[in-house]
């Protein structure tokens, strides 16, 4: 069952098999105000996810990741447009820290 943690973050833990689970975190990041509080809450939520769970972090981050694939080769692909914004920097840093990939940069 989905569990709302705030008006911007929701989680759901799904059984995959006997002892395997997937945790889905859905977010709607602020674009202007309260960014710090949002990312602090998201970090807190992420720290509570069991390391053995498969993790999917999805949502609207209001992020533009820019074209600097060389700076983030393990996090993003080469199919990006535009310039990086502050939410893009935060998203890339977060993904790098928890070893996630911005998947929509992998496809043309």
Image (spheres, rainbow, N blue to C red):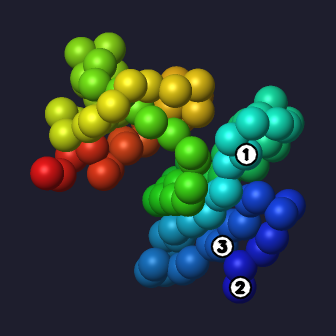
Residue at image mark 3: 12
Label 1 vs label 3, nearer the camera = 1
Vertical relation: 17 (above or below) 68: below
Q: Position of residue 16 (x, y in %)?
A: 46, 78
Residue 16 is marked as none
Ranked by sequence position, the earlier of labels 1 and 3 is: 3
Q: Residues within 10 Å of mark 2 (few under 14, many from 20)?
A: few
Q: How many marks?
A: 3
Q: Position of residue 99 (x, y in %)?
A: 43, 35
Ranked by sequence position, the earlier of labels 2 and 3 is: 2
Q: Residues within 10 Å of mark 3 (few under 14, many from 20)?
A: some
Residue at image mark 2: 1
Q: Secondary structure at mark 2?
A: loop
**What is the spatial separation of the Cα atoms under label 2 and label 1, in whole angstroms?**
25 Å
Ranked by sequence position, the earlier of labels 2 and 1 is: 2
Residue 30 is marked as 1
Vertical relation: 10 (above or below) 75: below
The image quadrant of residue 23 is bottom right
Q: Secondary structure at mark 1?
A: loop
Q: Secondary structure at mark 3?
A: strand
Q: Which residue of the protein is positioned furthest toward the top in this rendering?
A: 71
Circles 1 and 3 in contact, beta carbons < 8 Å: no
Circles 2 and 3 in contact, beta carbons < 8 Å: yes
Q: Residue at x 14, y 51 (%)?
A: 108
Q: In the rendered view of the protein, which quadrant contains the N terminus? A: bottom right
Q: Residue at x 54, y 79 (%)?
A: 15
Q: Residue at x 38, y 25 (%)?
A: 83
**What is the spatial separation of the Cα atoms under label 2 and label 3, in whole angstroms?**
6 Å
* In this picture, residue 23 sits left or right of residue 44: left
**What is the spatial separation of the Cα atoms under label 1 and label 3, in whole angstroms?**
21 Å
Label 2 vs label 1, nearer the camera = 1
């Amino acid at each position: 069952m989905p569990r709302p943690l705030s008006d911007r973050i929701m989680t759901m833990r799904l059984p995959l098999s006997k002892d395997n689970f997937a945790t889905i975190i859905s977010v709607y990041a602020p674009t202007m105000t309260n960014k710090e509080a949002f990312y602090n809450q998201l970090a807190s939520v992420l720290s509570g996810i069991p390391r053995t769970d498969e993790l999917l972090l999805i949502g609207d981050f209001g992020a533009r990741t820019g074209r600097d694939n060389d700076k983030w080769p393990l996090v993003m692909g080469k199919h990006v447009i535009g310039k990086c914004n502050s939410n893009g920097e935060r998203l890339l840093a977060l993904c790098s820290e928890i070893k996630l990939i911005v998947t929509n940069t992998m496809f043309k």
